[in-house]
Image: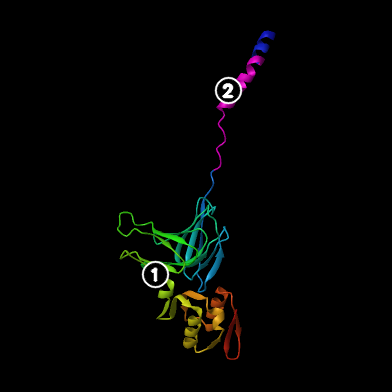
């Protein structure tokens, strides 16, 4: 009996070691990926801060979608509609916006993308920094492109006709009246206020020198009151608005 106990005791460590090898290791927890969408159902421009502290101003009717966790190899967002982006610098994690089959990549810059669902045209307008714009939805087509934009450039791509054009913003700034809207593309803010004065027949007082470096890209809904429109424009450009006897006073 004593010999048997001794033999078992001497073999137990090996037995335990073999059993330990047979027990499977716990599977590492896989990171769960979820998507978050931001919709602007209002008639005003909405400003949001992304997890990397980049900011985006989503125009009415726009939608932005991104994955959580946000910062991986890339910072990727998917856009429908019009948005202005101010991207935090991060050379290790490029910031990429996908819209209408076109990707816009930036390291740290500001730009506007117009990609309305009902339009066949996508426009990328660069304000500061540098961006790389390419067609990511044209496999086998002759319309593939890859362009580096510099400040003051605007890339306009017609997906249906496969026509591409790169222009300079100071040559394409314009506004046109469409039904109950005013559409501006890099129009000087002074010109925007003059146009609003004419339409609403309301005096807008401002110092032109204070606004000389400011421009506006977007759509103004003329069904809104002049007070609502001026509130949006002044908040967007960090200006102040004051109601005075003559009309409105805009100050820096």
Q: To which residue does mark 2 refer?
A: 18
Bounds of the magenta segment:
9-29
Q: Secondary structure of the magenta portion, mostly? A: helix
Residue 238 visible (yes or no): yes
Which type of secondary structure does the marked residue at label 1 adopt?
strand
- Could you tell me which quadrant the C terminus lies in? bottom right
For the point 56% across and 84% down, which residue is it? 207
| Dots 2, 1 in contact, CB < 8 A | no
Q: To which residue does mark 1 refer?
A: 167
Q: Is residue 2 above or below residue 185?
A: above
Q: Which of the two discs, 2 and 1, labels the residue nearer the N terminus?
A: 2
For the point 60% across and 23% down, which residue is it? 17
Q: Is residue 107 above or below residue 202?
A: above
Q: Quadrant of residue 165?
A: bottom left
- Closer to the camera, 206 or 14? 206
Q: Which numbered disc covers residue 111?
A: none
Residue 1 visible (yes or no): no
| Image spot of residue 192 (x, y percent) | 48, 81
| Image spot of residue 66 (x, y percent) | 50, 57
Residue 249 drawn in magenta: no
For the point 57% across and 33% down, which residue is it? 25
Tell me the distance, in whole angstroms, between the alpha carbons under discs 2 and 1: 72 Å
- Closer to the camera, 37 or 126? 126
| Image spot of residue 176 (x, y percent) | 40, 79
- Closer to the camera, 41 or 234? 234
- Could you tell me which quadrant the N terminus lies in? top right
Which type of secondary structure does the marked residue at label 2 adopt?
helix
In the rendered view, does 177 fall on the left or right side of 224? Answer: left
Q: How many marks?
A: 2
């Amino acid at each position: 009996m004593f010999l048997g106990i001794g033999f078992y005791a001497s073999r137990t460590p090996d037995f335990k070691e073999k059993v330990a090898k047979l027990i499977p290791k716990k599977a590492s927890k896989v990171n769960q990926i979820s998507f978050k969408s931001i919709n602007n159902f209002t008639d005003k421009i909405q400003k949001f801060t992304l997890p990397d502290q980049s900011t985006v101003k989503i125009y009415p009717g726009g939608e932005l979608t991104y994955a959580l966790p946000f910062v991986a190899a890339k910072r990727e967002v998917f856009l429908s509609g019009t948005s202005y982006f101010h991207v935090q610098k991060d050379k290790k994690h490029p910031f990429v916006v996908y819209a209408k089959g076109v990707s816009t990549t930036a390291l740290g810059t500001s730009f506007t993308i117009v990609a309305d669902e009902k339009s066949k045209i996508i426009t990328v307008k660069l304000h500061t920094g540098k961006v790389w714009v390419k067609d990511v939805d044209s496999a086998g087509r002759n319309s593939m492109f890859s362009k580096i934009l510099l400040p003051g450039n605007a890339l306009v791509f017609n997906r249906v006709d496969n026509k591409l054009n790169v222009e300079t913003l100071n040559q394409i700034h314009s506004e046109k009246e469409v039904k109950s809207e005013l559409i501006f593309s890099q129009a000087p803010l002074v010109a925007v206020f003059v146009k609003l004065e004419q339409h609403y027949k309301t005096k807008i007082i401002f110092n032109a020198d204070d606004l000389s470096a400011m421009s506006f890209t977007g759509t103004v809904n003329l069904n809104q009151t002049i007070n609502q429109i001026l509130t949006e424009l002044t908040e967007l450009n960090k200006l102040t608005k004051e109601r005075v006897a003559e009309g409105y006073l805009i100050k820096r």
